[in-house]
Image (cartoon, helix red, strand yellow):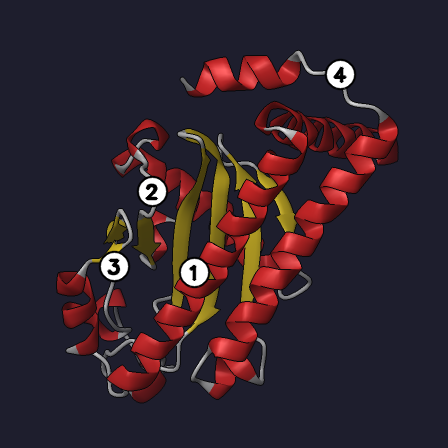
Amino acid sequence: MLEASKDRAAAIKIDAITLEVVYSSLLVAANEMSAVLGRSAYSPIIRDMIDYSCGIFDAQGNLISQAENIPVHLGSMGTALRELCRDFPADTFRPGDAYLVNDPYRGGQHTPDLHVFTPAFYQGRLLGICGTIAHHADMGGKNPKSEGFDNRSIFEEGLRIPPVKLAYAGAMNDAVLTIIAGNVREPKATMGDLRAQMAACRSGERRLQELAERYGADTLMAVMERSMNYSESRMRAEL
């Protein structure tokens, strides 16, 4: 199904103006995700230090647009998303689903950095994936803030979360939230920050759906494909 969607999008002819307008809208959508997360978060490390990032990926998991936060996060997000899709293939995604991962051995950076991903659908078709990564104030472990120069193993650095479902069709996975809340020193802040990440992803979903409604899903996905090709050609020219 995903390959058929990609083939249909590849057949669409995109003029330069449409490409620029739609791609600029994707950039705006990522920056709006950033604004939602920054204004909704509980912890100063997210809200004031801006230690988070937001991005929009295509249905194949390629980064298409990113907010102007911390670029190093985006490199991690792509790896974490690929790891997530090993356990939860894209053709099993459903509207309203959400996924969580922080395991450094599964694409995470360190345990306080939590990735949240949500698929965006339009008329039953997967348009892309919205992602956020945010540094939480604490993820348990031996020391407050989950970090310490004297930690001798990953098990001292806090709760490791392999790819798991954070929401099923819009309903939060309370079991996962209960486990996290029971392992952190400030559960209220951690739960609030997770909800802020979810809100940011839902914002990105709405913007993708609006773009699909206005320009057509095939056009939107063709713009994503063209943007990847353009980036490749610019990089090759620079090299």
Local crowd size for mark 3, using a 10 Å CA cut-off: few (<14), some (14–19), many (≥20)? some
Local crowd size for mark 4, using a 10 Å CA cut-off: few (<14), some (14–19), many (≥20)? few
Mark whose residue sits in front, 4 or 1: 4
110 or 24, which is in the foreground? Answer: 24
Q: Which residue is mark 1?
A: 109
Local crowd size for mark 2, using a 10 Å CA cut-off: few (<14), some (14–19), many (≥20)? many
> What's the residue type where badge 1 is placed?
Gln
- Tell me what residue is drawn at x 31 percent, y 31 percent: 89
Q: Is residue 68 left or right of residue 82?
A: right
> What's the residue type where badge 2 is placed?
Leu
Q: Where residue 173 sits: x, y (%)?
A: 19, 58
Q: Which residue is mark 2?
A: 84
Against 168, is 114 above or below? below
Mark whose residue sits in front, 4 or 3: 4
> How far apart, in angstroms, are the residues tagged by discs 4 and 3?
42 Å
Against 46, is 88 above or below? above
- Residue 13's disc number: 4
Q: Where residue 74 sits: x, y (%)?
A: 56, 53
Mark before the other along the chain sequence, 2 or 4: 4
Mark before the other along the chain sequence, 3 or 1: 1
